[in-house]
Amino acid sequence: MKKFNLKKLLAVALITFFPNLINSAEQIDPIKVNWSFKGLTGKFDRASLQRGFQVYKEVCSSCHSMQYLSYRNLGEPGGPEFSDEEVKAIAASFEVTDGPDNQGEMFTRPGRPSDMFVSPHPNKEAAAAANGGAYPPDMSVLVKARKGGANYIYSVLVGYEDPPPGVKLDQGVYYNKYMIGNKIKMPNNLEDGLVEYADGTESTVDQMAKDVTTFLAWSAEPELEERHKLGVKVIIYLILLTILVYLSMKKIWSRIDSEM
Amino acid sequence: MSKEEKNANRRDFLFTASYTVGAVGLGAVVWPLIDQMNPDKAQKALATTEVDISQIEPGKSITVLWRGKPVFLKRRTEEEIAEARAVRMDDLPDPQKDEERVKEGKDEWLVMLGVCTHLGCVPLKDKGDYNGWFCPCHGSHYDVSGRVRKGPAPTNMEIPKFEFVDNNTIKIG
Amino acid sequence: MSDHEYQPKSKAGKWFNDRLPLLTLGAHLTDYPTPKNLNYWWTFGGILTFCLITQIVTGIVLAMHYVAHADLAFGSVEHIMRNVNYGWLIRYIHSNGASMFFLAVYIHIFRSLFYGSYKSPREIIWILGLLIYLLMMAAAFLGYVLPWGQMSFWGATVITNLFSAIPLVGESITTWLWGAYSVDNPTLNRFFSLHYLFPFLILGLVVLHIWALHIPGNNNPVGIDIKKPSKDTVPFHPYITIKDAFALLMFMIIFAGFVFFSPNVLGHSDNYIPANPLVTPAHIVPEWYLLPFYAILRSVPDKLGGVILMFGAIFILFVLPWLDTSKVRSAVFRPIYRQFYWIFVIDVLMLGYMGAMPAEGIYLVLARVGTIYYFLHFLVVIPLVGFFEKTDPIPMSISEPVLSGGAEPSLAKKDNEKI
């Protein structure tokens, strides 16, 4: 009887735990991509991360901020792992506002690895004003902030279509089959050959979408590789200790059980 | 060995192994809880500060902030340098030549962590018995090279890592 | 119990113990006679202690890095995740720890409901437990507000607005809770303060809960009173400690699975969007552990009525020991109650599911049915079943099998009282 009830409990508990699974009636499911960072031992594809950063820098960063990242993050283990020199060069290619100086004036200087990513707009309101009233969300944790995560971001990037007949779009609104509500204020910014990849990879829309999504997945969870690595160790350790404690328990209780 | 003895041995082994493995795990859990209080990655990255020194007249000094601590940058006059170099090593609690505390060829620039080596106060400039700095907290006197001469401070004021980027700019850190 | 005879062996121990009898307490906890037939559902008390300590330790650490300010809170959480050494690990343990805590507490409560652990003479243990549960919900809600994401902000708005349902003074109370004219920086600050305070109140109540437990001793799956110590009991250490340790490790494996491999699956993605007072998320959903009560709240079309019913759903548990008329504790010997017990479990799970769904159509109808049944279970089913149920024969002791025909429940009770 106990076993039967346990199973039933588990089944219903699963549904209660993951209501999200059944929650998405109004839009089609995002494309499932076999990301290298999924699974218990998932890791990021370094080359893809570096390409993804290039797409971010050349395409996305003119509207989207990534205010929780520093340039130094680009060189840290588990990320794109640019070399120290590359990170310095990347940082130096941005103008950073610093100050105030001795005269109380703000001034600009080339970026350093310790600087945070430079935002394209001084504040949210300016960003919205420059983009037809729609604030381009900060992308630091975007993958964690969207149901469907990386799959969803990738799907939206490749999901632009002509609107089906009967759907009227306002000026500055685009049709996207994966976007919630199907209407998006971001134009389709990707086209084949848009960026010239340093490693010679062909820059198809699909490739760029995958690369930049990988980059965003890392930026949302820069600890992912360390987490996976430590997680495997912790679970193995716990299983080992559980077995030891189980055997000890059997040994201790055998004194009582034999009396029973 | 009798069967019972064997059983007892196995039991002892089990308990010892359980305790040992458990203790190792507990130790491993403690480390992140300690390490989280160490300087974080952002703190470690804030290693350098660049300072414009073109406005500093001879005999004057400025104070800048580096890693949350004051750094004294003093442009010394010829007399001050001569005074610093005339000191006999025997008179110093922490003997160190003035030449060792400045960059060669840039003898006029003293770049020094403005923190008293006694208990961390910031010494006052142009005070004290030695024409240098004086710490008001517990009365340590420093000379024009930042070396301790009198008082409870055990060592000279520390020289941070720095370099001249060009004639007008110093990079600390 | 041999409490009174306990004497430390060493002279220094005796000197200390005469002044502060900590060693006597230690000996009491070690020797504490525990029914030997406790099953794994009884290990959740220990697991809950572990959860509380884990939350307090990780929470203290997080508070060293967190900034309770509307403009900085979200960024400070990202700072913890990105820069603080092992910050991501500590934060994920804390956020998933809340869910694990509730998972364990629900199992603990439902175990009590099945085996009648709330019944005489354990009413005070039960009530203390419910107070702990209430404080846990408050602490969890306050904590969920701290990252200052969209769900934090709107969850805080919705929950604090519950108090505006109170006639006459409701609006003033809500404004008082906020310290502003909406959920704002003052709200965040006081929530942080209270979130830090509540776990220590819980800790105090846990001490009382365990103290109250040690007066009558543990209930057990058979539900009969037992003589202590006797051949029906074992000393707490090592028998129960090792069993608790084993169960705790199994629990930790699941816990670690969440922390390391799907740390955000129990949360809501909207909480990674910084709080925005101008835009409400499409679906406001509380954390899973509050969903059944959320469903009850929404199933009533009247504002005040919904709030009353929601709080009523919790407070009815406080009088459960007096609603239950059965002389037998354990559902093992209560064939009718057992059926209703499982219906009730399903009812609560269904309510939880409805709480996650939009409040419309079939979901709303089912939520209403579930709500009505929830109250029927306590107000009608439990009192009546206690009266009319013919219980199975119960054994005289844990060690003895059921005699043919068995003892009359009342008789068994009387016999045991004599002992």
Image: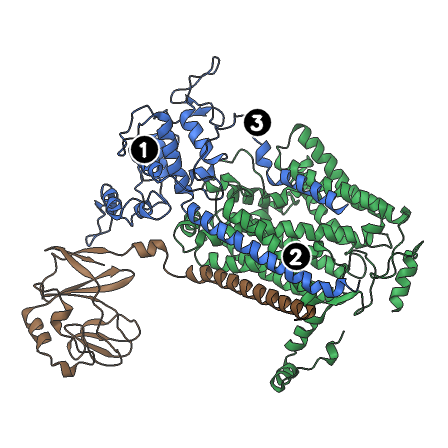
Chain colours: A blue, B brown, C green
Amino acid at dot 3 = Ala
Picture residue at 89% right of the left edge, 50% below the top: C391
- C362 vs B91, left or right, is right
The answer, for residue C263, to whether it is visible in the render is no
Mark 3 belongs to which subunit?
Answer: A
The answer, for residue B41, to whether it is visible in the render is yes
- Tag nearer the camera, 3 or 1: 1
Residue C161 sits in quarter:
top right
Which residue is denoted by mark 2 in the rendering?
Answer: C132
Q: Residue furthest right?
A: C405
Which residue is denoted by mark 3 in the rendering?
Answer: A25
Q: Position of residue A138 (x, y in %)?
A: 39, 38
Q: Secondary structure at mark 2?
A: helix
Label 1 CA crowd tier, 10 Å (few <14, some 14–19, many 20+) = many
Which residue is denoted by mark 1 in the rendering?
Answer: A55
Amino acid at dot 1 = Val
Looking at the rendered image, the quarter that the C terminus of chain C falls into is bottom right
Q: Secondary structure at mark 3?
A: loop
